[in-house]
Image (cartoon, grey):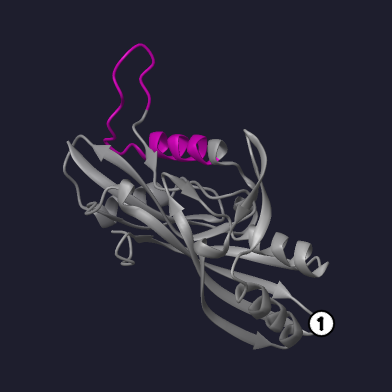
């Protein structure tokens, strides 16, 4: 049995499908691909699949990953092409590799937030002002209820680019099996602190390990 990591993107209209729907989609594609995938044992066998960190609804992912197991040895580029043929538009297989790190090594994620703004420089100044605060308290919603949460320790600003009518912000946030911080909370902070309601397309660029290296 061989462990295989499937790297894929989830963009366009596919960003609006839930993680459960993504799991069903991948399971169906794997069955149609006829790849020699391993099924779990027991009363209700199903294809073994495990995902690194599920994407939030509405967020695109450029380098997502899931692990499967193959019961036969085969060339991974060929296996990737075989699976790609059965996936819908906007979900693309990028490559297959042998995993090096376990998903429990995931600690951070790199995101790009693309803001529509009439005055992108003014919005950039607002973000700089908020991110310079000693603490940034927002209301975080969870299954256990709403609570105040300080996002300040969980965000690191990496880059800003100002274009006509557009502000691109790259940042790094906490993203692990112990808990993740959604970049949309930064938009909530702008709303709470400045009374503005910015709109941003959010893209997860990649996942990072505890030493800030790319997951692999």
Establish if 32 lies above or below 180: above
Q: Position of residue 109 (x, y in %)?
A: 45, 61
Establish if 152 lies above or below 25: below
Q: Residue at x 26, y 46 (%)?
A: 4
SS state under label 1: loop
Q: Position of residue 185 (x, y in %)?
A: 65, 58
Q: Residue at x 62, y 78 (%)?
A: 168
Between residues 21 and 133, which one lies in front from this camera angle? 133
Q: Label 1: which residue?
A: 118
The local crowd at label 1, few if under 14, some if 14 to 19, many if 20 or more residues have their Cα within 10 Å, is: few
Establish if 207 lies above or below 5: below
Q: Quadrant of residue 206?
A: bottom left
Q: Residue at x 68, y 82 (%)?
A: 124
Q: Position of residue 64 (x, y in %)?
A: 43, 55
Left or right of 69: which side holds 136? right
Is residue 117 inside the magenta stretch?
no
Is residue 42 inside the magenta stretch?
yes
Q: Residue at x 68, y 87 (%)?
A: 163
Establish if 136 lies above or below 116: above
Between residues 81 and 183, which one lies in front from this camera angle? 183
Which residues fall within the magenta stretch?
Answer: 22-46
Figure quadrant of the N terminus: top left
How many numbered marks, from 0 up?
A: 1
Figure quadrant of the C terminus: bottom left
């Amino acid at each position: 049995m061989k462990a295989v990591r499937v790297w894929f993107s989830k963009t366009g209209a596919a960003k609006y499908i839930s993680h459960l729907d993504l799991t069903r989609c991948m399971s169906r594609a794997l069955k149609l691909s006829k790849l020699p995938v391993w099924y779990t044992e027991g009363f209700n066998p199903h294809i073994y699949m495990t995902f690194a960190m599920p994407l939030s609804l509405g967020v695109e992912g450029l380098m997502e990953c899931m692990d499967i197991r193959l019961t036969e040895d085969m060339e991974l580029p060929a296996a990737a092409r075989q699976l790609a043929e059965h996936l819908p538009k906007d979900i693309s297989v990028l490559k297959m590799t042998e995993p090096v790190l376990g998903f429990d090594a995931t600690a951070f994620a790199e995101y790009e937030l693309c803001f529509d703004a009439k005055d992108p420089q003014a919005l950039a100044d607002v973000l700089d002002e908020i991110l310079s605060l000693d603490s940034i308290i927002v209301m975080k919603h969870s299954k256990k209820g709403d609570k105040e949460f300080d996002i300040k320790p969980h965000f690191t600003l990496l880059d800003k680019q100002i274009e006509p009518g557009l502000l691109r912000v790259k940042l790094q946030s906490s993203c692990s099996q112990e808990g993740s911080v959604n970049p949309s909370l930064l938009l909530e902070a702008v709303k709470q602190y400045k009374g503005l309601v910015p709109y941003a397309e959010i893209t997860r660029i990649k996942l990072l390990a505890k030493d800030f290296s790319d997951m692999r």
